[in-house]
Image (cartoon, helix red, strand yellow):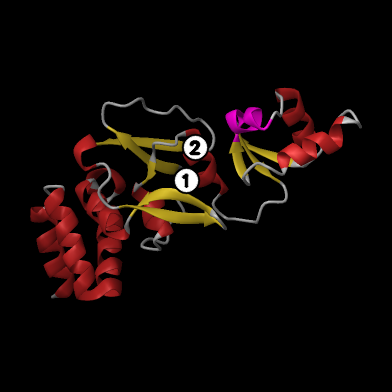
Amino acid sequence: MNPAAGPRCQQRLATLPPTFTTAQARQALLSSRDLASLVTDGDVDELTRGVYRRADAPETAHTDLLAVCRRAPRAVVCGESALALHELIDDIPSAVHIAVPRGSRRPAISYPPTVVAQYSAETFDLGVEPFEAAPGEVIPTYSAARSVVDAMRHRGRIGESLALSALGRYVRRSGRSGVGELQHIARELGALSVIRPAVEAVLA
């Protein structure tokens, strides 16, 4: 980096959030060459194409989720990734699982490995809640109840044992109020006939 440009770049970098996009960097008047120099100097890490994280940002175990959600701002963390965040499964997903509304463009993200599902636009926002992936940085994630219902709906794809295990853990942890929320979500998604007998089996 040009020695004279160093302080200028550092000042502009300091105005950016911990995880930022190329577009945000441009708004802060950082050029592509500036970004490349900051990466080379170790001041910035490139998480994925067009998404960066400041080296002085707080540590987090969720950089992959942050990277994907910044690349696909309309997406919601779903499936196995959401189940893992809610500690409803012990497995560590091998890819980031996100959902986008059916009919919208599917993000093409090769790294981090990403699995994209398309959910009905009418119920897409049902159960979406913020998850703090790093201090002060939130990403949209499906709630524990929505994630369990989705797992049961798609158990043929993610595995019946995994879906049932998540359901059992959710019911035992959340109690009667959690079961009510589970049934509400299932009713809205037309999956009550799947959820009700499974819950009764867990409670038996």
Q: State the image coordinates of residue 169 (x, y, percent, origin top left).
A: 30, 68
Left or right: residue 76 compared with residue 177: right
**Image quadrant where residue 67 sits:** top right
Which region of the structure is painted magenta? 21-28
Q: Which quadrant holds the N terminus?
A: top right
Q: State the image coordinates of residue 83 (x, y, percent, origin top left).
A: 36, 56
Q: Residue at the right extreme?
A: 3
Within the magenta stretch, is there residue 25?
Answer: yes
Q: Amino acid at mark 2?
A: Pro
Q: Which residue carries the number 1 mark? A: 94
Instruction: Please determine whether, in this image, residue 149 is positioned above or below residue 122.
Output: below
Q: State the image coordinates of residue 129 (x, y, percent, origin top left).
A: 36, 54
- Residue at 46%, 42% (x, y): give it: 95
Q: Which residue carries the number 2 mark? A: 113
Label annotation for residue 192: none
Q: State the image coordinates of residue 195 (x, y, percent, origin top left).
A: 14, 58
Left or right: residue 122 compared with residue 115: left
